[in-house]
Amino acid sequence: MSADSDERGSGPDAEARVPVLADVAQLAGVSQQTVSRVVRGSPSVARRTRERVEAAIAEVGYRPNVAARTLVTKRSHRIGVVAANAALYGAAMTLQGIQEAARATGYSVSLVMLPELTTTSVQEALEDLRAQFVDGAIAVVPEDEAQDAVRAVDAAFPCVLAPGLDGEGVADAYWAEVAAARAATDHLLDLGHRTVHHLGGPTDWAESRARSTGWRTALVERLRIVPRPVRGDWTAASGHAAALDLPLQEVTALFVANDAMAIGALSALVGKGLRVPDDVSVVGFDDVPEAAYYAPPLTTVHQDFAEIGRRCVRVLLGRLRDRVVEPGSVSPELVVRSSTAPPPVLR
């Protein structure tokens, strides 16, 4: 008896039968072999075809026969995920993308949430997952120390970093963020601002360094003064406090490393009697769902964190099959809203 026939089940209610491979193939308009390749994580399927099959899998509720596949492949068809800071928008959306892609390819997810990220806590979490016989792991751990711990374990246990180390991660996320930060800074300079101040994130995060590098590069290339940056810890409260450390009498444009700190900065500016964007233009980063409804709506850099999570899964499954899977590019894009305008002297 085939695995598909096992999945059909039995009973008087024909409508309640478990969806099988053929149902997915019919809905997606492809062969069952193509569906099987998508489920196995094969890189040979075209992107649009894969997305159509994944949508069909979700619609019909198809679940591969994991028990049968485990007997054949000697794998558990589970992947581990180690993460912290899930309250942050980027981390939460990356986890969502990982879970969606894992489910679509017949994998379950074992999630370990860490209250703090240290070399010891990350290594222990990965070793615990390995003891549970997961096939590999994805680490959503942006801090330098935690990423070093992942690299130390990776030699014996397949691990993928999301988004990854400087220039080495999924979709070269570091350099994409440098380019996006340059674009955000150039946007403010193109409006006529003489320079752009910066409210950055923690220096031990690759993303924070990338955004600061892009800001500084844009100013240097255009021969502008590079002001001393101030820093927060990604929270709105830290953005509020850091903004008050700026020489506000000199600031006409501010690039903030994430949207949460940007909303804190907006509150601080208004509290000091400044108007946005009449007196100060503000640009954020990440494009959280609320950004369009801030007062004023926030100009920011949009990131598809869920797609980064999905691509992490594809890269990991490729490694498990001794194949190189090119993750492709996930390019952030500047979204211009009402929080930016020319400086007062140009109006």
Image (cartoon, grey):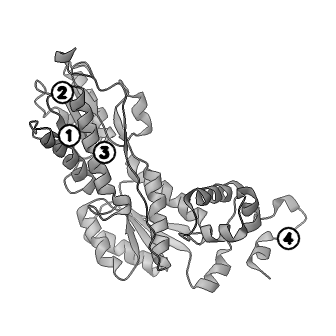
Q: Residues within 10 Å of mark 3 (few under 14, many from 20)?
A: many
Which structural element holds mark 4? Answer: loop
Please report whichever mark, 1 or 2, sits nearer to the chain's N-terminal start. 2
Residue type marked 1: Leu
Quadrant of the frame with the N terminus: bottom right
Tag in front: 1 or 2: 2
x then y, percent, for residue 150: 32, 71
Residue that mark 2 sits on: 193
What's the mark number on residue 10? 4
Which structural element holds mark 1? Answer: strand
Residue that mark 1 sits on: 199
Q: Residues within 10 Å of mark 2 (few under 14, many from 20)?
A: many
**Is residue 163 in view?**
no
**Is residue 322 in view?**
yes
Tag in front: 3 or 4: 3
Q: Who's the residue at 56% across and 68% down the image? A: 108
Please report whichever mark, 3 or 4, sits nearer to the chain's N-terminal start. 4
Q: Does residue 12 appear to the left or right of 87 in the view shown?
A: right
